[in-house]
Every structure is written in structure tokens, then in C-alpha cells.
Amino acid sequence: MSPARAAVLAGWGGALPEQVVTNHEIAARLDTTDEWIRTRTGIRERRKAGPGESTVELAVRAARDALRGGRADAVVLATSTPDQVCPASAPQVAARLGLGTVPAFDVNAVCSGFLYALATAAGFISSGIAQRVLVIGADVFTSLIDPEDRTTVPIFGDGAGALLLRAGDPSESGALGPIDLHSEGEQAELLWVKAGGSRCPVPAEPRERYLVMQGTSVFRQACARMAESSRAVLEQAGWMVGDVDRFVGHQANIRILQATAKQLGLPADAVVANIDRVGNTSAASIPLALADAVAEGTVVPGHKVLLSAFGAGLTWGATLLTWPSLD
Ligand code: COA
């Protein structure tokens, strides 16, 4: 049964750090090539946060766009790289935005974090806790990357994206549809940072504070799980695959996006991608891809848009909406 109060899209925004890091720059100092990175991942360049460009800073910049001068009465920040391990970063974002004492907290589901944050925000709205929720995905994921590791350096970048959700009617354009979320903690080691948390606060050796990734296994599971979750929300919404105009998947690898679209039976031109310019920005990936697609006219009002993500945890999920016209 549809909730009486739906979460309806009311704004969006994105923000990137200044510094561009090209494949050529990476190839100049690590054992890799521009060609390998482009053909294996689809990435040409990514952004790297400099001094002062923290997760809070990028989140505030993306959120200002999404709010466009309006207000929010709750803030949910998806991140796995908060400015400090404790406290959460969302209250600092809310304060910087002048939102007063609104509820504000972080959600950590790594690359699927934005979908988990959307679900949380939709719950706040349907339960009446809030009317307008700012949902941000922001990560300075390069802070977790070993600068000497050629298997992760080319892939990850920094950024932030945000959506504003307001209370509305489920039949409205922009109303968030069904949400499907999952996790599989037994496979946490496929993609993790071993030290720095409560189990091992101080790394036994410096590299333990960096992300390690078993790329091939992650690749296979990402395609299967995103396709599975996408089918689940399509079925719940009563949409056919042919109804979908745009597939905005987590931007981890262009081949993952293409393979997932193929598994779903979507045409290649339904795939929305900005990975060539930003790499994998973790929780920022989906809202940044949306903001870029709207700016470029790739996503327009009336488009039926399918969102899906997969990431560390493991975690994955999907949701969908019809893109609204916001005048
Ligand atoms: N430059 C050159 N060679 C590289 C390289 C690089 N930057 N990184 C890895 N290689 C090498 C590997 O060492 C391996 O060499 P080997 O065969 O001698 O062992 C070879 O390239 C192939 O590696 P493989 O892992 O089989 O390649 P792949 O086709 O799976 O592509 C990834 C590697 C990482 C791009 C791919 O697995 C991937 O995108 N995985 C998912 C990552 C992801 O989504 N992470 C985040 C999830 S949110």
C-alpha cells in the first residue's frame, strides 16, 4: 500500500573539488597507463579534495544548490568519510546552512549510502517527523586511498551531491517510488579499511588505514545485485523495463553500468554516466550523476528514472521516480 504522504523531489545540486587528476598524471607515478584506466573503467579524470575541501565543505556546497534559498527541517548525510570519526558531520552541515537545530545525522552504507539516506528521509516524511528533508551524499574517499595502490588510485574521486525531498502525494511527478535495500556483511572484507575503527584503532602498519579491494569479485556482484534490486523495484512499481528512460547506477565502472543495463534489457543509451569526469565518488555518485545529467539535458521532466547502487558492506539497493518539472 502506498504511504499517504510521499517524499517528492524538490531540488538537486552537486559540488566537486577544484583539483582535476588526469589518468596521465596517475600513469606518470604509478605502474599503469591512461589506456588501461580508460578501457577497464571508463574513467579519464577525477577530482581530489585539497586543503579546506572536506566532506562538510563539499556537502554544504551541494546542499546550497539543492535548497536554492529554501529551507529543510531535517538533514541526512550519506558518507563514510566524515570530517571527524566522531561526531557525525551532518550537524555541522546543518549549522553551516543556517538550518538551526533541525535533526541531522550521518548514514554510512558506503557507495549505497545515498539510497539508504533517501529511504531514511522518505520514512521521516511518511511518518510526519519532517516535511522537507535535505539528503546529501558526500565523500572525500581519496582520504582512504593508498597513494601507491594502482588498483584503487585510478578509480576513486571526491565530491558531493544533494536532493531535497518534500512531503507530497504519491501520484505526483517526482514522488519517490518503492525502495529496495540489502546487505551482506559476511563479505565485508572484499572492500574494506582494516584499521581506524574500534576493532583496531591504530594501524599495525601504515597501509592498514587504506581501502583494499578485491575488484573482480566486487565487479561481478555489483552487476548481479544492481540488476536484481532494479527488477524488484520495477515489479513493485508496476513498471516494465521498457518504461525506463534513464538508468542512473552507482558510477563505479562504466563496464558495470553497461553490463547491468544489458542484464536488465535496457538499451545502452538509457545509461547515465559521468564516471569519465569524476570516477567513483562513493555516496556522492548518484546525486552527482543526476545533477550533471539534468544540467546536460540527459534527464528531463517526465523521464522515468531508475536508480541503483552497490558498495562496500556489502550493501546494495534501488529505487525509481518520474523526473518532475521544477519551475
Ligand atoms: N593498471 C594496470 N594494470 C592494473 C591496474 C592498473 N591501474 N590495476 C590492476 N591491474 C592489473 C591487475 O593487477 C591484473 O594483473 P594480473 O592479471 O597480472 O594479476 C590485471 O590488471 C587485471 O586485473 P583484473 O582485476 O582482472 O581487472 P578487471 O577487469 O577486473 O578490472 C577493476 C579491475 C578494479 C577496474 C574492476 O575489477 C572493477 O571495476 N571492479 C569493481 C570496483 C568497484 O566497483 N569498486 C567499488 C565498488 S563501490
Image (cartoon, rainbow, N blue to C red):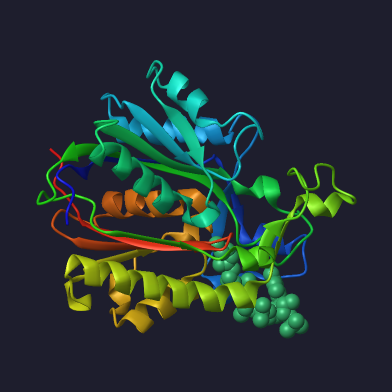
Residue 130, image x and y in percent?
28, 30
Residue 68 lies left or right of residue 227; in this view the side is: left
Residue 272, image x and y in percent?
34, 64
Q: Residue at x 53, y 43 (%)?
A: 79
Q: Is residue 107 above or below residue 102?
A: below
Q: Residue at x 75, y 53 (%)?
A: 210
Residue 285 shows in the view = yes
Residue 180, image x and y in percent?
35, 62
Q: Quadrant of residue 65?
A: top left
Image quadrant where one finds the N terminus: bottom left
Work out whether residue 99 or residue 327 is closer to the camera in this orientation and state it.
Answer: 99
Q: Quadrant of residue 267?
A: bottom left
Q: Is residue 145 above or below residue 163?
A: below
Quarter of the rendered structure image containing ligand 1: bottom right
Q: Residue at x 31, y 55 (%)?
A: 293
Q: Quadrant of residue 191?
A: bottom right
Q: Residue at x 71, y 64 (%)?
A: 27
